[in-house]
C-alpha cells in the first residue's frame, strides 16, 4: 500500500452506521466458505480465494488533498473536522493497515499445504545405462485436508473479528476528534470572554488612577482595583495558553499545521430544548458494540481452532499419494500411505491453551458488558445534569446579570452610583458568561459521549483488568 494513499471517509460521519461502514466495504466470508456437512468433500476443498478480501478504500494523494482543501475553505464544523481527520490522520491509516496485515495472516493460515513430489533414478546394471529404474511419488497431507473446514471457519471468524476491531478503532478515533473540537471551540469562546473581562478591568484600573491622582480615591481602594486588573490579565494569559493547547491537540488529530490557514467556529451552539432519547441507551450501546462482536467472533474462532487441533492430534501428518515405478520399460503404479505416530505430540497443550483463551474471552466479554452498562448510566446522569445547568445559565442567570448591568447603567446615568460599581457589574456579567461556556462545554462533551456509546463505542474510564490481558 503506497504511503501517499489515505482512507476515504463516508459523506455523513455523524451517523453511527456511516462511521461503522467506513471500514467494512466488502462482504464477509461468502456462503461457499461456510461448512455444510451434506456436501461431501466440497467444504474441505474450498480455496482461500473464496473468502472475499476485506478491502479498505484508499484515495490517491491528489484527490485526498483536494477534498481536504475543500473542507478547509470554511470554518471546520464538527462533521467537517471528522472528515478531515479520517482523510489526513496517518496514525489511523497505520492502524487500519495493521488490520489488513492480520487478515492476510489469517487467510494464509487457511491455505492448503502443497503436495510433495519425490523422485529417484538409479542404474540397475553397473556396466550398462540400458538397465535403469525411475521411481516418482506424489503425496498429499490428508490431515491438513480434514482440518481444512475448521481452519476456514477460524479464518472467516478471525477476519470478521478484525473488521469489528477496525470499526471500534474508528469509533474511538472519531470520539477523540469530537472531544478535541469541542474543547477548542469552547477555549476560543472562553478566550473572547476573558479578553472582554480584561478590557473592563483595564478600564476600571485607568479610571481608578485618575480618581486617585485627583484625591477622590483612597490608596486601599486603588490597590484593590489594580489587583483585580492584574488577576484579569493573568486569567487572560491562562485562557490564551489553553486555547493554543486545544488548537495543538485538534491539529494533531487532523494532521494539520498548528499555524495553518484553518479555523473553527467562534462559539458552541446553544443546548437543544429537549434531550435525545436516553431511555434505551444501555441496551443499544451493548447491542451496537463492535468490541463485543469482536470478542464473540474470537470465541467462535477459538472453537474452530480446537476442532482443527483435534484432527492434528488424532491423525498427525496422514499422507496419501501415488507412486510410479518405471523399470526397464515397464511401468508399475500403486498407492502410498504415511502417518506420524501420535505418541508424544497430540496437540493436547495447544488445545488447553485455546480453551484457556476461550475462558479469557468469556471473562472479557462479561467485563466489557458491565463496563458499557456502567458508562451508559454515568453518561445518562451527566447528560441530564449538564443540560439542566446549561439551560439554567441561559434562561436564568445570564438574563438576570444582563438586567443588573442595565439597571446599574441607568443608575450611573442618574449619577446615583459611580463608575466602579458599573464596571464591577459588567465584569461580573462577563464572568457569568465565561462560566456558561464551561457549562456548554460540559453538555456537548456529555452529548458526544452519548453519541459514542450509542454507536457502540466505549468510554475511556482507564484500563480495565479484562482488557489488559488482551
Image (cartoon, rainbow, N blue to C red):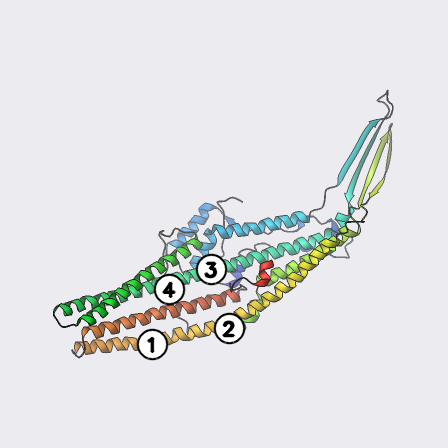
Q: In x, y percent, where is residue 232?
A: 28, 65
Q: Is residue 136 left or right of residue 35?
A: right
Q: Which residue is mark 4?
A: 186
Q: Is residue 322 left or right of residue 59?
A: right
Query: Which mark is on residue 397?
Result: 1
Q: For the point 31% across and 70% down, which residue is it? A: 431
The numbered mark, 2 or 4, whose residue comes first in the sequence reads 4
At mark 3, the secondary structure is: helix
Q: Is residue 87 above or below residue 208?
A: above
Q: Is residue 180 above or below residue 107?
A: below
At mark 4, the secondary structure is: helix
The numbered mark, 1 or 4, whose residue comes first in the sequence reads 4
Tag count: 4
User: Rounded to the nearest whole Å, what is the CA distance between mark 3 and mark 4?
Assistant: 15 Å
User: Rounded to the nearest whole Å, what is the CA distance between mark 2 and mark 4?
Assistant: 25 Å
Q: In x, y percent, where is residue 28?
A: 63, 55
> Between residues 182 and 248, which one lies in front from this camera angle?
248
Q: Which residue is mark 2?
A: 278
User: Rounded to the nearest whole Å, what is the CA distance between mark 2 and mark 3?
Assistant: 22 Å
The numbered mark, 3 or 4, whose residue comes first in the sequence reads 3
Q: Which residue is mark 3?
A: 176
Residue at the limit of the structure toward the left, as seen here: 214
Amino acid at each position: 500500500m503506497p504511503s501517499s494513499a489515505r482512507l476515504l471517509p463516508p459523506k455523513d460521519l455523524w451517523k453511527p452506521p456511516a462511521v461503522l461502514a467506513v471500514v467494512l466495504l466488502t462482504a464477509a466470508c461468502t456462503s461457499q466458505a461456510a461448512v455444510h456437512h451434506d456436501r461431501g468433500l466440497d467444504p474441505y476443498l474450498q480455496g482461500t480465494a473464496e473468502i472475499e478480501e476485506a478491502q479498505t478504500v484508499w484515495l490517491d494523494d491528489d484527490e485526498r488533498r483536494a477534498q481536504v482543501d475543500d473542507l478547509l475553505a470554511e470554518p471546520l464544523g464538527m462533521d467537517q473536522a471528522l472528515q478531515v481527520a479520517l482523510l489526513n490522520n496517518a496514525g489511523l491509516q497505520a492502524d487500519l493497515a495493521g488490520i489488513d496485515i492480520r487478515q492476510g495472516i489469517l487467510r494464509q493460515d487457511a491455505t492448503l499445504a502443497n503436495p510433495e513430489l519425490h523422485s529417484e533414478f538409479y542404474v540397475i546394471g553397473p556396466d550398462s545405462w540400458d538397465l535403469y529404474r525411475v521411481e516418482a511419488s506424489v503425496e498429499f497431507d490428508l490431515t491438513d485436508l480434514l482440518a481444512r473446514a475448521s481452519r476456514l471457519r477460524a479464518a472467516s471468524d478471525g477476519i470478521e473479528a478484525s473488521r469489528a476491531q477496525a470499526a471500534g478503532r474508528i469509533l474511538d478515533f472519531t470520539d477523540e476528534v469530537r472531544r478535541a473540537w469541542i474543547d477548542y471551540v469552547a477555549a476560543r469562546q472562553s478566550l473572547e470572554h476573558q479578553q472582554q473581562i480584561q478590557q473592563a478591568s483595564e478600564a476600571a484600573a485607568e479610571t481608578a488612577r485618575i480618581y486617585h491622582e485627583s484625591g477622590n480615591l483612597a490608596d486601599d481602594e486603588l490597590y484593590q482595583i489594580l489587583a483585580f486588573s492584574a488577576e484579569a490579565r493573568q486569567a487572560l494569559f491562562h485562557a490564551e495558553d489553553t486555547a493554543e493547547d486545544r488548537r495543538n491537540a485538534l491539529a494533531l488529530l487532523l494532521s494539520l499545521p498548528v499555524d495553518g490557514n484553518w479555523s473553527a467556529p467562534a462559539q458552541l451552539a446553544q443546548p437543544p430544548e429537549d434531550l435525545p432519547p436516553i431511555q434505551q441507551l444501555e441496551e443499544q450501546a451493548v447491542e451496537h458494540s463492535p468490541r463485543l462482536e469482536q470478542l464473540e467472533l474470537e470465541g467462535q474462532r477459538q472453537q474452530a481452532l480446537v476442532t482443527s487441533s483435534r484432527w492434528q492430534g488424532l491423525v498427525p501428518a496422514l499422507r496419501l499419494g501415488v507412486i510410479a515405478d518405471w523399470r526397464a520399460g515397464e511401468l508399475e503404479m500403486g498407492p502410498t500411505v504415511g502417518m506420524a505416530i501420535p505418541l508424544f505430540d497430540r496437540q493436547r497443550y495447544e488445545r488447553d491453551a485455546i480453551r484457556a483463551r476461550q475462558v479469557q474471552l468469556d471473562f472479557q466479554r462479561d467485563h466489557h458488558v458491565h463496563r458499557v452498562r456502567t458508562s451508559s448510566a454515568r453518561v445518562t446522569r451527566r447528560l441530564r445534569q449538564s443540560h439542566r445547568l446549561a439551560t439554567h445559565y441561559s434562561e436564568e442567570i445570564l438574563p438576570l446579570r444582563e438586567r443588573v448591568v442595565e439597571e446599574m447603567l441607568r443608575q450611573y446615568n442618574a449619577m446615583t452610583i459611580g463608575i466602579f460599581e458599573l464596571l464591577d457589574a459588567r465584569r461580573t456579567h462577563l464572568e457569568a458568561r465565561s462560566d456558561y461556556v464551561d457549562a456548554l462545554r460540559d453538555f456537548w462533551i456529555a452529548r458526544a459521549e452519548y453519541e459514542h456509546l450509542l454507536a457502540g463505542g466505549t468510554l475511556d474510564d482507564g484500563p480495565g483488568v479484562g482488557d489488559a490481558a488482551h
